[in-house]
Amino acid sequence: MATDDLMTRALEALGDDGPLSVEAIHRLADLVDLPETMTIAEVAGLLDISPHTLRYYERAGLVEVARDGNGHRVYDAEAVRRLVFLTRMRLSGMPMRDLQHYISLVDAGGHTVPERLDVLVEHRDTIRRRIRELTLSLTAVEYKIATYGGSTGPDVQDLGTTTGTDRTALPDEPLRRALPAE
């Protein structure tokens, strides 16, 4: 399943009830009602990703999966928990090489906690920068929508318009006289 679809599903699961919290993350990772073991199809359905992606994560060394007597993958709760984490990190834009490095640190043991913390702090800073960039882009789009007489989202402050000149032109567009609002 595409990353956008997984992100949409994750956001829908969280709902619109205010700021995100650790409790929201616990709800996303709640694995209490899962069977003791799961097949690749069951895990793929649970995480809304393809079996191909699960096999890729295994080949990349991100998760170890046991096999049954017929050679079929059998996912236990530990593997599913790790996959929940992996999918969240991928949704947040963490590159595979960083995920592989992080998982190798986890697998190496507790003495790697300081380095794991460094990896996560760096990733958090990257996410925060992306959020700022996206917020700036959203503001530009909302401003253009308001300029053309459309309705902006409920979370947008009064954008106002500059009287006389359309300051919403992109750098490669000429400034033009704004149309009077009706």
Image: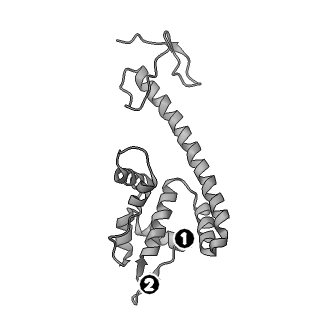
Locate residue 142, reporting x and y percent. Answer: 44, 29
Locate residue 112, reporting x and y percent. Answer: 66, 69
- Residue 119 appears in which quarter of the rendering? bottom right
Furthest residue to the bottom? 69
Q: Which residue is mark 2?
A: 67
85 on left or right of 98: left
Q: Which residue is mark 1?
A: 62
Q: Are marks 2 and 1 in contact (CB under 8 Å)?
A: no
Closer to the chain start, of discs 2 and 1, is 1
Q: How much space separates mark 2 and mark 1, taking CA atoms?
A: 16 Å
Residues 98 and 55: in front is 98
Q: Is residue 97 above or below residue 18?
A: below
Locate residue 99, reporting x and y percent. Answer: 58, 63
Determine the residue positioned at 63% across, 72% down: 110
Q: Secondary structure at mark 1?
A: loop
Q: Is residue 66 above or below residue 33?
A: below
Q: Secondary structure at mark 2?
A: strand
Quadrant holding the C terminus: top left
Determine the residue positioned at 33% across, 76% down: 35
